[in-house]
Each structure stands twice: as structure tokens, then as C-alpha cells.
């Protein structure tokens, strides 16, 4: 009984702490402690995201009791509420599924020891130079008893983890190059070999953190105040504003201000809705042949290679990040370049639903089910709205986004007409998608603002959830197919 009372007290304390975390006025608190000689850090960023005004994010938690409850549960479990969760709070149904899956992967019973799990998270996030996630898991790694020496670099980690470097590299940047031989080298490495169950756990963690790095950059997630890069000790420089005003985005250009000059975005949503209606009518009137569908896929795949990331300069990783992975020069390259030909991955030959799901669930029980629910949640999530329009069926648009990402990875669905993609996704949107999915560290605020100018921030976050989950599933399909080929 005493234990139950203590637990209740903890939950209440955590609930109070979350409420303070979301609503506290740090400016007033700083003034009260100034006389004590305590140096109080000031947030460097304007809330959880560089792209989304903080007041929009925090308003969600104030009006939605379900979101508030999920935040409290997350805080109770981890002792913190990270900025990724705050931004995902726009979509509480998805957030619940995401947190449940991540908690299981990192903290519940599984093939890999806890410190290995966090170290693999560090390795995966480092591939995309995502210092936000690297720092998060460095702290978690040390908390679960990880060896500080491993953090000096991958070459200080156990040989077994070092051998994961090649898989991490290919999976993050060119997963279509994975073969059963890559898996065989890990599974037959004598005293450093991986078991099948361990390898499945590692693969799921790698794909989870590669795709989460995409979401982190795509939403402009800022470091928490207690993390590196999240604070300063300098006083506010804008004397006419309270720090609270600055943190809530006052004095900054609004998302909808025209930062590109007088571009005409009026009617953007209506044009997109009209194209969806037209495509639906064409579907009803006639159906393209299998040959034509295959041709349209190859055309779209080729066109996707011509989409160049807008900020296409070289990103050189810092020593703090690059020490956690090998071969820093290895990055994303389009398949079929320089005469290479990668065979199309046909979804009916190896799909998540018919093949990947059962393999994961057999070797790492319950995880297949959790991943499946998370994929379905992102893919099927809809409020039947587009900007200010209600009662809109957005399934055609969601499918175009998902299938475009898989097309960039060489994965083809025989029953999908790839001609729809060019009708529904304009060039600025394609640039954003390709950058966020393939080279997320190059994503900029300008890119985020350049697509879907009339849409809500919550709708753009939903797009980022779609991109993240489609990417994760594409990587998983290549890895699981290679493992299946090794097993057979």
C-alpha cells in the first residue's frame, strides 16, 4: 500500500513537473535567483522547433487532454520530455504508438543489452550528423552503465559493434546495395558473431534512428536547454521583449510571411484538390496496362534522380560526431548512376505485410506488431482536412507521398500508377522529400517553408511522420530481404 501511495505521489510530482516544463516563465525565475549568484542558462532556440512557433506547439498540449496525458506518461517513464515528443504532440494517436515502440526497443526485454541499444542509436544518428540524437543517447548510454571509453570512438567499442559499421553505413545511405553476404559476415564472425535475434534488434534500431534523424532535421528540432547547443549564459539582447515573448516567437517572421518575395501561392490547396478529383475520375474511366504502369514507375524513378537537394553543399561532420562511425565520405548516391543497374525491388516479391512482419515477429516477439501499428498509424492518419477545407479524402495524396519515397529507394508496387506522383507533388515538395529522406542533415528552414505554403504546421508535421515511416520501412525491407536470403 505504501508503495502504491509513493507511486501516486511520483505521478503527481511528474505531472506537476510536466506542467511547469510546458508553462514556466523562466524570466521571472531567473530574476529571483540572480541575487543568489546562480548562473541560470537561457534557451538559445525559440521552443522545440526552429521551423514552428513555440506557441503553436504548446497550445496543442493545453487544449488536448490526451496529449497532456501522453506527455505525463513519457515524463514519468524517462524523467524528461524531449522536443521530438512535443512536436509529435500535434498527432497524439501517432505519438502514443511511437513512444510505445521506442520504449520497447530501448528498455524492455530483448536480445541486446541496454547499453548496446543506446550505442547503436548513437552510431545510427551519427551517420546523419544528428548531434541532437547522439547527445540524447550518450547520456542514456552512460546512465545504463555504458563504458565511457566507447564514446572516444567506434574503434574503442567491442569488435562486435564495430562490425555493425558497414551495415549502418549502407543501410543509411544506399540500402539497395545490401546482400545476404553482408548478413553472413555478421552472423558467422566466430567469437564476435551476432545471433539472428540480435541482428534483427540491431537492424530495427538502426532504421529507427536513421529515420528519426530525418524527422529531427525535417522539423528543425532544437536541443533542450540542458543539452549541448541548447542554452547560453548571456542575457537577452532584445530589451523590448521579455524572454517569454522571445521564446514564443514574437519578433520573428511568421511562417506564412513571404520570405521568397511575392510568390503567388493563392489557390495552391484548391489546385491540388482539383488534381485529386481529376485523377480519381481518370481512375474510374480507364485503367492503364501493366506495361504502361511499369514504364511510368521507371520514368518516375529516373526523374527522382534528377531532383537535386536545394542546399547541395558538402556537410563535413564534426569530430564529436564522426568518431562514432566509419568512412565519413560515404553518403547518399542515386542508384543506377554511372552505368550501375539496381534491379527493381518488386513489393509483391517481398513486402512488409507478407514477409518482413512475420520475420521480425518470429525473432523479436511483439516488435513486428508494434512496427506494423506504427506504419499503419502514419499511413492512415487523417482528419479529412486540407488547410481550411473539411471533409476531404486525402488517401490519394498520402499514398503518392509514401510511394514516391519507396520509388526513390527502387521499390515498386504493381497496382500503383506512378503517373499520379507528378500530378500531386510539385518540384519544391520533391526537393524537400528527397533532402529529408536521403540527406536530412542538409534540410533547411527555407525548404520547409517552400512547400505547401497554405497548409498548417500540423499538416507538415504529419508529412514528416509519413516520410519518416516510409523511409524506415524501405530500409527494413532491404535488410530483412537480405536476412531472409541468408536463411534460405
Image (cartoon, rainbow, N blue to C red):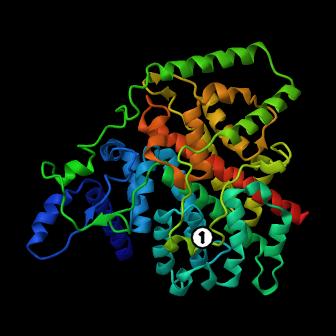
153 w.r.t. 129: above or below: below
Estimate the x, y position of residue 6 in percent, counting from the top left.
34, 73
The extreme right residue here reads 488
Give the quarter of the image for residue 21: bottom left
Quadrant housing the C terminus:
bottom right
Estimate the x, y position of residue 196 in percent, counting from the top left.
78, 71
Estimate the x, y position of residue 56 in percent, counting from the top left.
33, 42
> In the picture provided, is 387 more to the left or to the right than 128?
left
At 68% from the left and 39% from the top, the residue drawn is 306
How many labels were placed on the picture? 1
In this rendered view, identify the residue nearer to me: 96 or 45.
45
At 85% from the left and 64% from the top, the residue drawn is 180
Estimate the x, y position of residue 113 in percent, counting from the top left.
62, 78
412 w.r.t. 184: above or below: above
At 25% from the left and 53% from the top, the residue drawn is 23
> Disc 1 on helix, strand or loop?
helix
The extreme left residue here reads 35
Q: Is residue 378 visible?
A: no
Quadrant housing the N terminus:
bottom left
Q: Is residue 8 visible?
A: yes
148 w.r.t. 352: above or below: below
In this rendered view, identify the residue nearer to me: 312 or 270.
312
Dot 1 surroundings within 10 Å: few (below 14), some, or many (20 or more)?
A: many
Give the quarter of the image for residue 19: bottom left
At 36% from the left and 33% from the top, the residue drawn is 256
> In the picture provided, is 229 more to the left or to the right than 234?
right
> In the picture provided, is 192 more to the left or to the right than 53?
right
Residue at label 1? Answer: 123
In this rendered view, identify the residue nearer to me: 434 or 132.
434
Amino acid at each position: 500500500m505504501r508503495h502504491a501511495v509513493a507511486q501516486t505521489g511520483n505521478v503527481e510530482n511528474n505531472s506537476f513537473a510536466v506542467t511547469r516544463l510546458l508553462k514556466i516563465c523562466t524570466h521571472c525565475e531567473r530574476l529571483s535567483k540572480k541575487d543568489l549568484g546562480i548562473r541560470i542558462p537561457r534557451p538559445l532556440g525559440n521552443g522545440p522547433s526552429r521551423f514552428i512557433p513555440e506557441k503553436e506547439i504548446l497550445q496543442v498540449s493545453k487544449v488536448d487532454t490526451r496529449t497532456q496525458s501522453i506527455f505525463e506518461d513519457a515524463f514519468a517513464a524517462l524523467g524528461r520530455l524531449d522536443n521530438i515528443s512535443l512536436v509529435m504532440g500535434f498527432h497524439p494517436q501517432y505519438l502514443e504508438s511511437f513512444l510505445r515502440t521506442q520504449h520497447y526497443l530501448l528498455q524492455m526485454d530483448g536480445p541486446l543489452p541496454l547499453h548496446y541499444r543506446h550505442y547503436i542509436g548513437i552510431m545510427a544518428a551519427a551517420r546523419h550528423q544528428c548531434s541532437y540524437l547522439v547527445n540524447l543517447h550518450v547520456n542514456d548510454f552512460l546512465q545504463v552503465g555504458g563504458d565511457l571509453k566507447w564514446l572516444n570512438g567506434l574503434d574503442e567499442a567491442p569488435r562486435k559493434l564495430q562490425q555493425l559499421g558497414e551495415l549502418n553505413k549502407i543501410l543509411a545511405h544506399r540500402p539497395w546495395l545490401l546482400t545476404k553476404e553482408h548478413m553472413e559476415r555478421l552472423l558467422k564472425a566466430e567469437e564476435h558473431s551476432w545471433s539472428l535475434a540480435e541482428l534483427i534488434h540491431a537492424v530495427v534500431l538502426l532504421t529507427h534512428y536513421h529515420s528519426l534523424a530525418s524527422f529531427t532535421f525535417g522539423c528543425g528540432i532544437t536541443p533542450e536547454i540542458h543539452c549541448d547547443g541548447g542554452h547560453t549564459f548571456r542575457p537577452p539582447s532584445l530589451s523590448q521583449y521579455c524572454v517569454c515573448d522571445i521564446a514564443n516567437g514574437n519578433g520573428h517572421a511568421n511562417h506564412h510571411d513571404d520570405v521568397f518575395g511575392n510568390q503567388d501561392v493563392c489557390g495552391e490547396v484548391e489546385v491540388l484538390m482539383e488534381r485529386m478529383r481529376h485523377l480519381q475520375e481518370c481512375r474510374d474511366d480507364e485503367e492503364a496496362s501493366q506495361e504502361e504502369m511499369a514504364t511510368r514507375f521507371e520514368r518516375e524513378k529516373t526523374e527522382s534522380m534528377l531532383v537535386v537537394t536545394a542546399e547541395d553543399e558538402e556537410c563535413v561532420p564534426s569530430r564529436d560526431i564522426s568518431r562514432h562511425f566509419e568512412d565519413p565520405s560515404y553518403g547518399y548516391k542515386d542508384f543506377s548512376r554511372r552505368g550501375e543497374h539496381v534491379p527493381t525491388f518488386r513489393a509483391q516479391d517481398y513486402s512488409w505485410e507478407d514477409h518482413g512482419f512475420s520475420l521480425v515477429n518470429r525473432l523479436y516477439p511483439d516488435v513486428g506488431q508494434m512496427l506494423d501499428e506504427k506504419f499503419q498509424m502514419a499511413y492512415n492518419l487523417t482528419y479529412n482536412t486540407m488547410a481550411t477545407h473539411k471533409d476531404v479524402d486525402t488517401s490519394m495524396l498520402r499514398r503518392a507521398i509514401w510511394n514516391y519515397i519507396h520509388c526513390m529507394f527502387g521499390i515498386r508496387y504493381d497496382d500503383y500508377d506512378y503517373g499520379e506522383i507528378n500530378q500531386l507533388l510539385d518540384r519544391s515538395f520533391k526537393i524537400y522529400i528527397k533532402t529529408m529522406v536521403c540527406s536530412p542533415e542538409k534540410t533547411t528552414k527555407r525548404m520547409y517553408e517552400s512547400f505547401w505554403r497554405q497548409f498548417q504546421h500540423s499538416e507538415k508535421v504529419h508529412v514528416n511522420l509519413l516520410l519518416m515511416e516510409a523511409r524506415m520501412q524501405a530500409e527494413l525491407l532491404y535488410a530483412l530481404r537480405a536476412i531472409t536470403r541468408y536463411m534460405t
